[in-house]
Image (cartoon, rainbow, N blue to C red):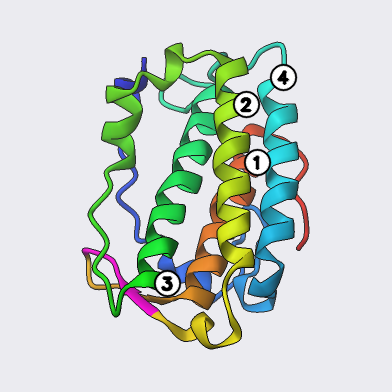
Amino acid sequence: MSDRITPDDKNWTWVLERRCEDCGFDASSFDSTRTPDALRDQVLRWTAVLEWEEVRTRPHLDVWSPLEYGCHIRDVFRKFDERLKLMLESVDPAFENWDQDATAIKDRYDLQSPKTVVEQLGEAGISLAKRFESVTLEQWTRRGFRSDGSVFTVDSIAKYLMHDPVHHLWDVGAEVPRY
């Protein structure tokens, strides 16, 4: 059940400053203009994960299954698509708070259909890739503000975003790309 997970209350913005020791993603060396291609690659990688025979199996009671991580990545893609749209269409928008753990419980990630999640994750990832493709040179410096006060530019939010699906591939034991 999703409610046995210990909520993640870490502020992961540190990934913008240094390489993640776990998954190896280094935002400082990631070219954010490559985000659309990296997102398309992530869709393929997560599709493969969601086809695993043991996709619903948790390695421990308090650790998400690959299916639950896949649901989370789908929702990350959706949330970042909303945030990027705000950044491109508004001046200095404030992002609505998102409790990812509450979403996992409310939406019962553990009971979702892997086939449906594959379809939804693909749609969300491609939509986000297309939105990043629409970013003009001048728009990479546009800002947005998270509810905790963290400031992002389109460039930094792309780098921050890309750590999430890469890190969760590492969490489930899948091959981690080096972008």
Q: Nearer the viewer, residue 168 or 132?
A: 132
Q: Which label lies toward us, 1 or 4?
A: 4
* Residue at the spot of label 2: 118
Q: Is residue 119 left or right of residue 93?
A: right
Give the image location of residue 49, x and y in percent: 70, 28
Give the image location of residue 98, x and y in percent: 28, 48
Whether the magenta-drawn stretch holds residue 146 is answered as: yes
Mark carried by residue 169: 1
Tell me the crowding category of disc 2: few under 14, some 14 to 19, or many 20 or more residues within 10 angstroms, Cα based: many
The image quadrant that residue 147 belongs to is bottom left
Sequence-earlier tag: 4 or 2? 4
Tell me the crowding category of disc 1: few under 14, some 14 to 19, or many 20 or more residues within 10 angstroms, Cα based: many
Q: Which amino acid, by three-letter code, is at mark 2?
A: Val
Q: Does the residue at mark 4 contact the one at mark 2 (Cβ under 8 Å)?
A: yes
Query: In whole angstroms, how far apart are the C-alphas of marks 4 and 2?
Result: 9 Å
Q: Which amino acid, by three-letter code, is at mark 3?
A: Leu
* Residue at the spot of label 3: 88
Mark carried by residue 51: 4
The image quadrant that residue 171 belongs to is top right
Query: In whole angstroms, how far apart are the C-alphas of marks 3 and 2?
Result: 28 Å
Q: Is residue 102 left or right of residue 174?
A: left
Q: Is residue 82 left or right of residue 65?
A: left
Q: Does the residue at mark 3 contact the one at mark 1 (Cβ under 8 Å)?
A: no
